[in-house]
Image (tube, rainbow, N blue to C red):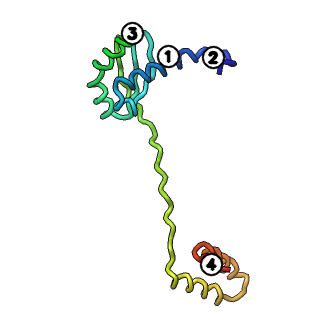
Amino acid sequence: MRGNDKMAALLPTVARLAALQQDCASVLPALFDACSVLSFESGQLVLAAPNAAFAAKLKQQLPKLQEALLKGGWQVSAIRIKVQVRKIAEKTRPQKQLVLPSAAKSALASLKESLEETPQNQELKAALEAMLKRHVSGYR
């Protein structure tokens, strides 16, 4: 980033906002896990909250936060909160692995063996073969 003139100009601002974020998190650790500092200009601090309920909780703590930031050397004259809904990463569910009973496995094997060797049955036989390989260890 330092090599690009435009990006290098942003580094002090980014460092300042990161330090402010860290100071806010040290004052209100439980709330700042989900909140973030959006901007800090002319003494106006703008915070982001993930939803209205969080914003209401944060609003109750603003006097405490402002006082602590002033003691820490930040010239905060006002604090605003913006609700910014973030897309929540969807938790991946583990895929269910179907376990076939041995009777079903043997029925599939006998079905595969009983099918005639015709072009119409080739795809069905291949699908049965693949299914049996997945569910029967040591199947051919």
> Which secondary structure, mark 1?
helix
* Residue at image location 60% in from the left, 72% down from the top: 134
What is the CA distance from the residue labelled 4 to the residue labelled 1?
63 Å
Q: Amino acid at mark 2?
A: Ala
Reading the image, the residue beneath label 3 is 75
Q: Nearer the viewer, residue 39 or 11?
A: 11
Q: Amino acid at mark 4?
A: Leu
Q: Quadrant of residue 69?
A: top left
Residue bearing mark 4 = 128
Mark 2: give few (<14), some (14-19) or many (20+) Cα within 10 Å.
few
Real-space CA distance between mark 1 and mark 2, rounded to the nearest whole angstrom: 14 Å
Location of the C terminus by quadrant is bottom right
Q: Is residue 1 rendered to the left or right of residue 33?
A: right
Q: How many marks can you see? A: 4
Please say if 43 is above or below 32.
above
Q: Earlier in the sequence, mark 3 or mark 2?
A: 2
Instruction: Answer with mark 4 or mark 2, whichever residue precedes in sequence.
Output: 2
Return the x and y of residue 100 as percentages of the image width and height. 51, 77
Q: Around disc 4, counting alpha carbons within 10 Å, would you say few (fewer than 14), some (14 to 19), or many (20 or more)?
A: some
Q: Residue at x 52, y 18 (%)?
A: 15
Mark closest to the chain's N terminus, 3 or 4: 3
Residue type of the residue flagged with mark 3? Gln
Identify the mark nearer the N-term, 4 or 1.
Answer: 1
